[in-house]
Image (cartoon, grey):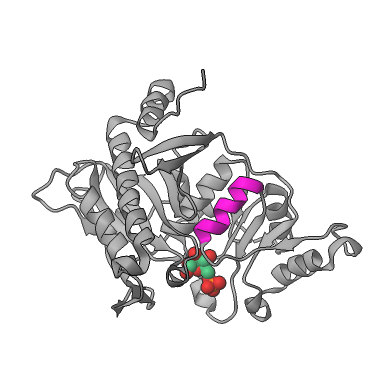
Amino acid sequence: MAQSKISLTRYLVEQQRADGLIPGQLRLLLEVVARACKSISQAVNKGALGGVLGTAESENVQGEIQKKLDIIANEVLIEANEWGGHLAAMASEEMDSIYVVPNRYPQGEYLLLFDPLDGSSNIDVNVSIGTIFSVLKKPDDTPGVQEGDFLQAGSKQVAAGYCIYGPQTTLVLTVGAGVAMFTLDREQGSFMLTQEDIQIPADTKEFAVNMSNMRHWDAPVKRYIDECLAGKEGPRGKDFNMRWIASMVADVHRILMRGGVFMYPWDKREPEKAGKLRLMYEANPMSWLVEQAGGAATNGRQRIMDLQPSKLHERVAVVLGSKNEVERLTGYHDPL
Ligand code: P6P
């Protein structure tokens, strides 16, 4: 008899029984986030029929014009998570400061960070986008909860994942015991386990970068990409392919499924920003997923999950994916 599909709930219960990595409150948190992603998926799938495309009349903390769906996704995540008693506060790419759970609800021990809808530039042209989330524990020693409680290195995460809204709606999750993937069964309304122990091949012939920024990169990144472009006649002795979806969730999902290296390097246009991508709710969760799948993730010099954040919306350069490629590019940089 075919093995019955395992739902996300059953997976979390059995994982808790197996290795205790998912205390009850964390399991509740992850199930609530998954339910919120289902709602976001419904809104995204409606598109023009739901009147949710196009821009809102507002900017986010990054100075980016917000899409209507950015705001909808943010509100869905806040409303789904604020009453459950598992969270002390939330932080979002779409909100300047943290959102502390209102006094009318019990406060929990976890902190939830998210990019509610990553890849917004792709929303109106029907290209895959996604929700990225990261879970930290509130430090015990501080009464209440402040923004500083969120400023923990990526190595302190207790859960991380994303939900990609593409041809399938797929939730990818780690709690530190490997990476599992769940596909939304719309008839049942449940996320069903479709892959576990995902592994990224250590080598690859595929790189992902926005080539239009090449003139702004520093020398080691230019060297690495030039060598890839030189193909089998060049020092790498093999031809490379390139992909760039401009949705980090989609590019990272491809790498988890078939390998590759993704980079959004530092560029000289905004040196103080270190990079375009955000450390706390993009780079850290994606880095943990990639490392748990046998890959690597650095800012070009240091392991991303070792970086000590100083600001909630801190940006970082990102190189992640197939371990041997990340190590090669990182090795081209002068040691710190
Ligand atoms: P560019 C989406 O806006 C995002 O934050 C990531 O999802 C994506 O990898 C990157 O920016 C795309 O940036 O400069 O190529 O549009």
Residue drawn at the location 33% of the way across and 73% of the way down: 60
Asked if residue 329 is positioned above or below residue 107 in the image, the reply reads: below
- The relative height of residue 113 versus residue 245 in the rendered view (above or below) is above
Using the rendered image of the protein, determine whether residue 229 is visible from the camera's viewpoint: yes
Figure disc tally: 0
Q: Main secondary structure of the magenta part?
A: helix
Q: Which span of residues is magenta-colored?
A: 248-258
Residue ranking furthest to the top: 1
Residue 219: x, y in percent? Answer: 72, 73
**Vertical order, 279 against 285 (above or below):** below
Task: Say which residue appears at 53% left-offset and 34% top-offset.
Answer: 196
Please tell me in which quadrant of the rendered image residue 281 appears. Answer: bottom left
Q: Position of residue 28 (x, y in %)?
A: 28, 37
- Image check: 241 left or right of 118? right
**In front here: 92 or 164?**
164
Location of the C terminus by quadrant is bottom right
Q: Is residue 28 left or right of residue 272?
A: left
Q: Position of residue 332 (x, y in %)?
A: 74, 62
| Residue 275 in view, yes or no | no
